[in-house]
Image: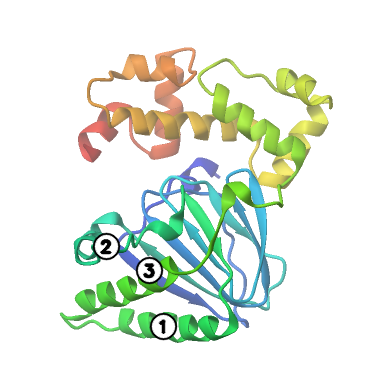
């Protein structure tokens, strides 16, 4: 299985809503990131949400807001839970941003992500609104797209008035050593990184670190490092003055050929073609 293909994902449309009910079989959810915005509303039950270098325990009524290019996935604790998932692109919400001149509709995503704990009355109001969006999404008439924008605007307006717990300030790290390793990779991705080097810095054996990292994040260290490097490369590719050779060097690859192979495994395109199709 090509694990990389599950990392960088984009929905086929600018807007999507999905509902998972309690009696449905759980789906395999891989660590992934995308360019759009995600709102996860846990209606009932318990779950855990992996975001960046942390696992957040969430309960019925909690809402998790994920901004663009943030690594995340759900970690199911039990099958008996109900949740809504909304994805939307910036282009979908852009027309409304000018309308709400005194409200930042995207403030719920904080720096990049945030978690909300609405009160009971607000939970019920939000549940009704999510169902309303879900029902409207199932329609196929010519007016549904505009109405979905209005409903999403209402949802974001309501959420913008709720108190946000920033992910950076959340007090439940995955694991102290794993959090340190992830931060180290984020700060040193452009350098040569070895398992032994990180293990020595964490005062544990390379074998134990490798197993611990895979267990807690779902990634092998090598895949995670490559993923971070290619994500940085994608950002640099958007700066047109940067050529591919410079990007390969600045993202920690020792050769252009290694960079090309890894880039294609993850995105399905060579760096040159990706730049042509996405810029």
Is there a contact, CB below 8 Å, between mark 2 and mark 1? no
Residue depicted at 27% across the width and 62% down the height: 93
| Quarter location, residue 101 | bottom left
- Across and down, in percent, residue 130 comes to 43, 80
Name the residue located 65 percent from the left edge and 52 percent from the top edge.
Answer: 170
Image height of 216 relative to 73, above or below: above
Secondary structure under the numbered disc 2 in the rendered image? helix
Mark 3 / mark 2, whichever is N-terminal: 2
The residue carrying mark 2 is 93
Above-or-below relation of 188 to 91 = above
| Residue at 31 percent of width and 83 percent of height | 136
Mark 3 or mark 1: which is in front?
3
Q: Residue at label 1?
A: 129
Give the labeled residue for mark 3. 156
Disc 3 to disc 2: CB gap under 8 Å: yes
Quadrant assignment for the N terminus: top right
In-front residue for pair 100/265: 100
Q: Is residue 204 visible?
A: yes
Mark 2 and mark 1: Cα distance apart in space: 17 Å
Q: Is residue 84 above or below residue 115?
A: below
């Amino acid at each position: 299985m090509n694990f990389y293909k599950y990392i960088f994902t984009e929905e086929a449309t600018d807007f999507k809503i999905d509902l998972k009910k309690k009696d449905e079989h759980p789906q395999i959810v891989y660590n992934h990131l995308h360019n759009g915005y995600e709102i996860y509303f846990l209606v009932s039950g318990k779950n855990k949400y992996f975001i960046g270098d942390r696992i957040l325990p969430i309960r019925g009524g909690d809402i998790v807001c994920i901004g663009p290019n943030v690594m995340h996935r759900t970690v199911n604790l039990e099958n008996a839970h109900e949740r809504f998932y909304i994805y939307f692109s910036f282009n979908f919400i852009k027309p409304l941003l000018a309308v709400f001149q005194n409200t930042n509709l995207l403030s719920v995503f904080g720096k990049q992500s945030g978690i909300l704990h609405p009160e009971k009355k607000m939970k019920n109001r939000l549940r009704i609104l999510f169902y309303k969006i879900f029902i409207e999404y199932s329609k196929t008439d010519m007016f549904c797209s505009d109405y979905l924008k209005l409903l999403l605007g209402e949802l974001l307006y309501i959420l913008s008035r709720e108190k946000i717990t920033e992910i950076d300030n959340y007090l439940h790290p995955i694991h102290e050593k794993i959090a340190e390793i992830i931060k180290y990779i984020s700060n040193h991705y452009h350098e040569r990184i070895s398992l032994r080097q990180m293990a020595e810095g964490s005062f544990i054996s390379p074998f134990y670190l490798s197993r611990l990292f895979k267990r807690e994040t779902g990634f092998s260290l090598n895949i995670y490092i490559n993923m971070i490097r290619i994500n940085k490369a994608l950002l640099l590719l958007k700066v047109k003055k940067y050529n591919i050779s410079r990007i390969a060097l600045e993202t920690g690859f020792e050769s252009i050929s290694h960079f090309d192979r890894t880039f294609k495994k993850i995105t399905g395109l060579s760096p040159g073609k990706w730049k042509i199709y996405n810029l």
